[in-house]
Amino acid sequence: MNLFCIGLSHHTANVETRERFAGGAGAECTLRAAGCAEALVLATCNRVEVYGASEKRVSTDEIAQCLLQNGEVNERGHSSALPFYRYEAERCVQHLFRVASGLDSMVVGETEILGQTKKAYQSARASGAVGPCLHRLFQRAFRVAKQVRTHTEITRGSVSVGSVAVDLAQKIFGELGNCKVLVLGAGETSERTARALISRGVSDLRVSNRSNDRGQELAQRVGGKAVPFDKWAQQCREIDILITSTSSETPLLTPANLGPRLANRVDRPLFIIDIAVPRDVDPAVNEMEGVYLYDIDALRSVAEQSLAVRRQQVASAEAIIAEHVADFLEKVSNELNRVSRITGHPPVADSSLHASQL
Amino acid sequence: MGFLFQTAFLSIRGRALGRCPLTNLFEVFIFLAWSVALIYMLVGPAYRLSLMGAFTAPLVVLLQGLALIAPIDVRHPVKVPANSSLEFHASVSLVAYGAFALACIAGVMYLVQERQLKTHQLRSIFYHLPPLTDLFTAITRLLWLGFILYTVGIASGFFTGRPLPHMQVVAAIAVWLLYAAILQGRYFRRIAPKRVAALCIIGFSAALTLLWGITFSAQTHPGP
């Protein structure tokens, strides 16, 4: 009985293909009926993978057919025409450890995949599709992912403009629950950033837009309060975070017009996120005491710095994974040899994993 | 563990001397390092500031290292008699220095974090340092704690029953006034947080200079 992983991911298949094979409810039961002693389907927006253990070799075609949504028949013929990959034994172990650690993700080091893997494991376990072999493998994968996260900086920083802005806000203000936010301009990026701030606890959100109707619409969508456009400047006395993205041709905020408004708030920082092009805020504003100005280039630069650091950390993460793969295989091999001595079965020649004996 | 050893050392030394072990610069440095560790252990968990310990440990090591390496463990030719009010004055003042030292450390952390935010150059340490507002809150509270203890320490100095050297009194009051000015500026929101952080470093440097001056002159004249 061998351990294998068959799947497709953002590396090999486009989203339409991934959707077709996303595996519906009960896919694990179907897989077991197809000959897998143990089976687990990991389906996320970027990958669909089956981890299984079987007595006889289950072909990729059979697995692909089990994964097809709504009982669709794979009319395109043989799986070689489809972008499936297949890893067995050691490579399967290594692949799972890389996936759980976020090394195989579209954004290297993202941590969501670990939660998704845990969820897939719990669901398969609840349905009885996970046996001792996959249990042991996945428990080790969770341990590896945790170690990679702790011992490297693979998850450091944020890699998208919106989350960089939110991270910076938290590094300035700590808890965002008491922060007052003004969104100036009802652009899409502003809305995304505002939503990200709301998700981290911001409750006082104000929206101001040249077109009052659009401003009110956005305020309603995000649960904020609309402020007339001719009154936005007065808000600078109160707010902690300003997100600006208007289409103004000239800067709306300069040291000259912002200075008097900050006179009575010397101990409260002001974080300005200027995502407008051309910029709404004069860069000289960043020189003012207690004001932290980030334009779109600065945010992108921070995101790129984080991504570069994550890429630099890949080698360290791979080393941790390699160590665990070797250790896992050695332990399994020792276990099998011990069992073979007791039962009189022939010992294992290599590192192939035999779930039934485990 | 280190703090326990420091306490044990001070206890043994105190028993040998028959008084609070603050008779020379060596003992003062050890007592100061102990005060820094004490204040950190008292307030550190309350503020839960990540890396505060990492910044505090080098200062403690530096103070103890100086005490061990420099030839400053000079015994007085005659045994210094115990004077409880003088010992209270000296020890409370040194614990106040411990609070000022931690405010200084938090100030350094604030300036490091603030600089990175301003320049948009976020190094690895940025992700481990606490938020600016949390650091500033800690600085303010540590300043108040240090200031109250220092006020008690200075006030008790007038009741030691000994004549006070004029220069030491002036210097001690100058340091007290500096911290009073920082707190007053903070209270009335006249000084920006960045300046408060910088002043904490200046204030502690001035306080250390004063401490060295007091202890150095005291070594030439018996006293704590």
Image (cartoon, coloured by chain):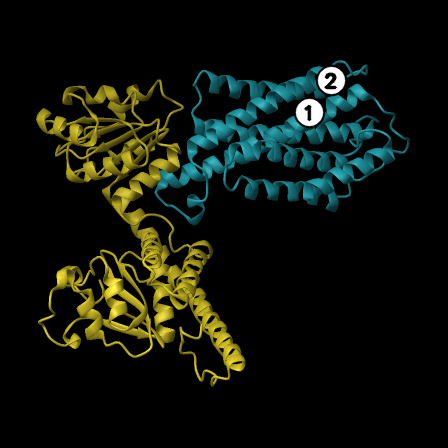
Chain colours: A yellow, B cyan
| Extreme residue in the right direction | B78
Q: Residue at image x 54%, y 79%?
A: A342
Element on which disc 2 rests? helix
Front residue of B131/B174: it is B131
A118 left or right, relative to B139:
left
Look at the picture and state if A174 lies above or below A260. below
* Gap in angstroms between the C-alphas marked 1 and 2: 9 Å
A249 left or right, relative to A238:
left
Precedes in sequence: disc 1 or disc 2: 1
Residue B4 visible (yes or no):
yes
Q: Quadrant of residue B93?
A: top right
Q: In the rendering, which numbered label is found on residue A154? A: none
- Looking at the rendered image, the quarter that the C terminus of chain B falls into is top right
Task: Give the amino acid type for the residue marked by disc 2 in the picture.
Answer: Gly
> What residue is pinned by disc 2?
B157
Q: What chain does mark 1 sit on?
A: B
Task: Give the amino acid type for the residue marked by disc 1 in the picture.
Answer: Ser
Q: In the rendering, which numbered label is found on residue B93? A: 1
- Looking at the rendered image, the quarter that the N terminus of chain B falls into is top right
Front residue of B210/A303: it is A303
Q: Residue at image x 83%, y 29%?
A: B19
B221 left or right, relative to A58:
right
Look at the picture and state if A306 lies above or below B202. below
Look at the picture and state if A121 lies above or below B107. below
Circles 1 and 2 in contact, beta carbons < 8 Å: yes
Q: Residue at image x 15%, y 61%?
A: A69
Residue B104 visible (yes or no):
no
Query: x, y percentage for residue A91?
Result: 35, 73
